[in-house]
Image (cartoon, grey):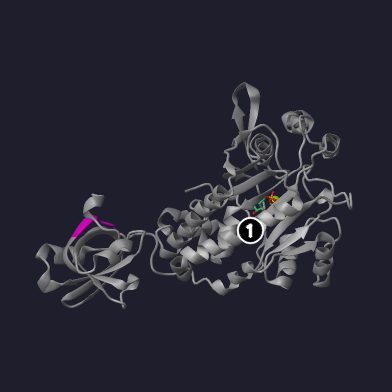
C-alpha cells in the first residue's frame, strides 16, 4: 500500500503530479459546489479541494458523509499554494472513505480539561501539537545516541528488575519467584559504574521508576533517563561533558525541528542562552542567593523547586549548583576533599524557572568511606556487596550523571508539565491508557 501512496511531507517532490494520500480528516468546509477536506497523516497537513463538476458522483457523495477522523484516500494533482496549510493543495480527482468515524469522536475543536485529555490520550496524541512534541522527543533520543557514539561511549542496557538498591525515594515492587521481591529500577547508575570499570566510558538510556507521591509538573512515576558513567573523569570533566551534551541537544533541535517548535509557539530566542558558558555556583552561594530572594532554605537542605527557580532566574541560562552538603545527597557521591561536609556533585538547573534536569557527581572511590555512608544511612549493606567490591578490586576515579529526558523535552519545547512530553504518562492516579 505504501508504494502507491504518498506521505504529506513528501508532496513537495510531486508538484504537478497525480498522487494518492492516505490520511485522517481534521476539518471540512464547503461552499456550494466546492468542498475542502483538511487531513493529516502524522507527517503534515494537506488541504484537498473537490469541485463537484470535476469529481465522480460517488466521491462528491462521500464528502457529504465525511466526519472528523474518518480515514480517507485522496487522489489528485498536487499544487504549490502558499495559502494552504503546509504549503500544498490537492485538486481532488477521487475521494474514497476507508474508515468512517462516528460523530461522537471525543476530542472536539474546543477547550478540554486536562483530565479529559489524559483519559483520551490515544486520541489526543493525534493533535498537531502532540505530534510536534513527539517528533522533538524522537529527535532528542537520536541526538543522545549520536552525541555519545561520536565520543566512542558504549551504550549499555541495565536491568529494570533489581534487588533493593538505588535512590532513596519510593520503590515499586513485584513478586520474583523464590528470591522474594524485585524492585523496578530507579536508576541504572550503580550498574553503570560496574560497566565503566569494564568498558571505560558508557551510557545507559532506559526507563526508570519512582513511586513519586508528589504531584508536581516535573515528576512522573515512569520516566526515561540517560546515564553516562566515565572512568578517569573527575567532577570538572563531568560538568564539561554535561555542558557540551546539553548544548548539543538544544542546538540539534533548533537546527532540525523549527517546524515543530513553530507549531508549539516556542519562543526559541530563550534557548540561545545555551551558547554562553553555563554558570557554576557553589551550593553555599546558591543558598544565600535564594535566601536573599525570600526563601527560608537553610544550609544543609536540598534545594526545592521554588529555590531552584529563584537561582536560575538570576542568570537566565543553565546553572550548575556544585558541592551540596553530604546529608542532602546520595551515599555514592565523593566527599569533597576541600570541605568534607560537602560532596563533589552538581545539579544542572535549566532556565525559565525549570530547575533540575541533571543530577551528577564524582563517585566515592574509597571503600571504607562508602561503607560508612551506607551504614550511616541505614541501607542494607548486603544488597550492595557487588557494588562495594568495585572499590575493592581496582578502584578508580570516576564520575557520571543522569539527565531526565522528559524534563529536557519540556524545557526545550516550552511545555509547562512533563505529562505532555511522553506518549502515555504514568503518574499517581494515572495508569491508563
Ligand atoms: P527532584 O529533586 O526533582 O525530585 P531528583 O534529584 O530526585 O529530582 P535524580 O535522582 O537526581 O532526581 O535523577 C536524575 C534526573 O532524573 C533528574 O535531574 C531529573 O531530570 C530526572 N528525574 C528524577 N525524578 C524524576 C521524575 N520523577 N520524573 C521525571 N524525571 C525525573
Ligand atoms: Mg526526587
Ligand atoms: Mg533533586
Ligand atoms: Mg538530583
Q: Image point 82% across, 64% down: which residue?
A: 287
Horizontal and vertical percent position of residue 244: 63, 58
Question: How many numbered markers are drawn?
Answer: 1
Q: Is residue 103 left or right of residue 342?
A: left
Q: Image point 84% across, 53% down: which residue?
A: 325
Q: Image point 28% across, 57% down: which residue?
A: 101
Q: Quadrant of residue 172?
A: top right
Query: Closer to the camera, 99 or 256?
Result: 256
How busy is the neighbourhood of tag 1: few (under 14 within 10 Å), some, or many (20 plus)?
some
Q: Is mark 1 within 8 Å of ligand 1?
A: no
Q: Quadrant of residue 333?
A: top right
Q: Image point 21% across, 57% down: which residue?
A: 97
- The rendered magenta stretch, by its main secondary structure, is classed as strand
Q: Which residue is mark 1?
A: 244
Horizontal and vertical percent position of residue 164: 69, 34
Q: Is residue 278 left or right of residue 78?
A: right
Q: Quadrant of residue 186?
A: top right
Horizontal and vertical percent position of residue 173: 63, 35
Q: Is residue 75 left or right of residue 385?
A: left
Query: Closer to the camera, 359 or 182?
Result: 359
Q: Residue furthest top?
A: 178
Horizontal and vertical percent position of residue 74: 21, 62
Residue 348 visible? The answer is: yes
Residue 112 visible? The answer is: no
Q: For numbered disc 1, what is the local secondary structure?
A: helix
In reply to whether residue 91 is colored magenta, the answer given is: no
Residue range highlighted in magenta: 96-101
Query: Closer to the camera, 163 or 78?
Result: 78
| Up/down of 43 relative to 29, above or below | above
Amino acid at each position: 500500500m505504501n508504494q502507491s501512496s504518498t506521505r504529506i511531507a513528501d508532496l513537495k517532490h510531486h508538484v504537478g503530479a497525480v498522487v494518492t494520500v492516505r490520511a485522517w480528516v481534521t476539518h471540512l468546509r464547503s461552499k456550494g459546489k466546492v468542498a475542502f477536506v483538511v487531513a493529516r497523516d502524522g507527517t503534515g497537513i494537506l488541504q484537498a479541494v473537490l469541485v463537484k463538476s470535476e469529481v465522480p458522483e460517488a466521491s462528491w457523495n462521500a464528502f457529504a458523509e465525511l466526519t472528523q477522523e474518518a480515514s480517507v484516500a485522496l487522489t489528485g494533482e498536487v499544487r504549490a499554494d502558499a495559502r494552504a496549510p503546509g504549503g500544498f493543495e490537492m485538486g481532488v480527482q477521487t475521494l474514497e472513505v476507508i474508515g468512517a468515524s462516528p460523530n461522537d469522536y471525543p476530542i472536539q475543536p474546543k477547550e478540554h480539561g486536562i483530565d479529559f485529555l489524559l483519559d483520551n490520550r490515544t486520541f489526543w496524541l493525534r493533535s498537531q501539537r502532540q505530534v510536534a512534541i513527539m517528533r522533538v522527543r524522537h529527535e532528542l533520543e537520536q541526538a543522545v545516541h549520536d552525541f555519545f557514539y561520536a565520543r566512542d561511549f558504549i551504550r549499555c542496557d541495565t536491568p529494570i528488575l533489581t534487588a533493593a538498591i538505588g535512590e532513596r525515594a519510593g520503590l515499586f515492587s513485584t513478586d520474583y519467584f523464590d528470591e522474594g521481591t524485585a524492585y523496578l529500577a530507579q536508576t541504572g547508575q550503580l550498574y553503570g559504574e560496574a560497566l565503566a570499570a569494564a568498558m571505560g566510558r558508557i551510557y545507559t538510556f532506559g526507563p526508570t521508576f519512582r513511586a513519586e507521591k508528589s504531584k508536581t509538573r516535573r515528576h512522573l512515576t515512569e520516566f526515561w533517563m540517560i546515564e553516562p558513567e566515565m572512568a578517569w573523569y573527575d567532577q570538572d570533566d563531568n560538568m564539561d561533558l554535561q555542558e557540551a551534551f546539553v548544548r548539543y541537544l538544544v542546538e540539534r533541535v533548533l537546527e532540525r525541528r523549527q517546524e515543530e517548535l513553530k507549531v508549539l509557539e516556542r519562543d526559541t530566542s530563550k534557548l540561545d542562552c545555551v551558547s554562553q558558558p553555563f554558570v557554576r555556583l557553589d551550593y553555599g552561594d546558591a543558598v544565600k542567593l535564594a535566601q536573599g530572594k525570600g526563601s527560608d532554605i537553610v544550609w544543609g537542605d536540598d534545594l526545592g523547586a521554588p529555590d531552584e527557580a529563584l537561582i536560575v532566574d538570576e542568570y537566565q541560562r543553565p546553572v550548575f549548583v556544585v558541592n551540596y552538603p553530604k546529608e542532602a545527597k546520595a551515599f555514592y557521591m565523593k566527599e569533597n576533599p576541600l570541605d568534607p561536609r560537602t560532596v563533589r556533585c552538581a545539579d544542572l538547573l535549566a532556565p525559565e524557572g525549570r530547575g533540575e534536569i541533571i543530577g551528577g557527581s564524582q563517585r566515592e572511590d574509597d571503600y571504607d568511606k562508602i561503607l560508612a555512608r551506607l551504614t550511616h544511612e541505614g541501607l542494607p549493606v548486603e544488597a550492595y556487596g557487588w557494588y562495594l567490591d568495585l572499590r575493592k578490586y581496582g578502584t578508580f576515579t570516576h564520575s557520571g550523571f543522569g539527565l531526565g529526558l522528559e524534563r529536557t523535552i519540556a524545557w526545550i519545547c516550552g511545555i509547562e508539565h512533563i505529562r505532555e512530553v511522553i506518549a502515555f504518562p504514568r503518574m499517581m492516579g494515572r495508569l491508563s491508557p
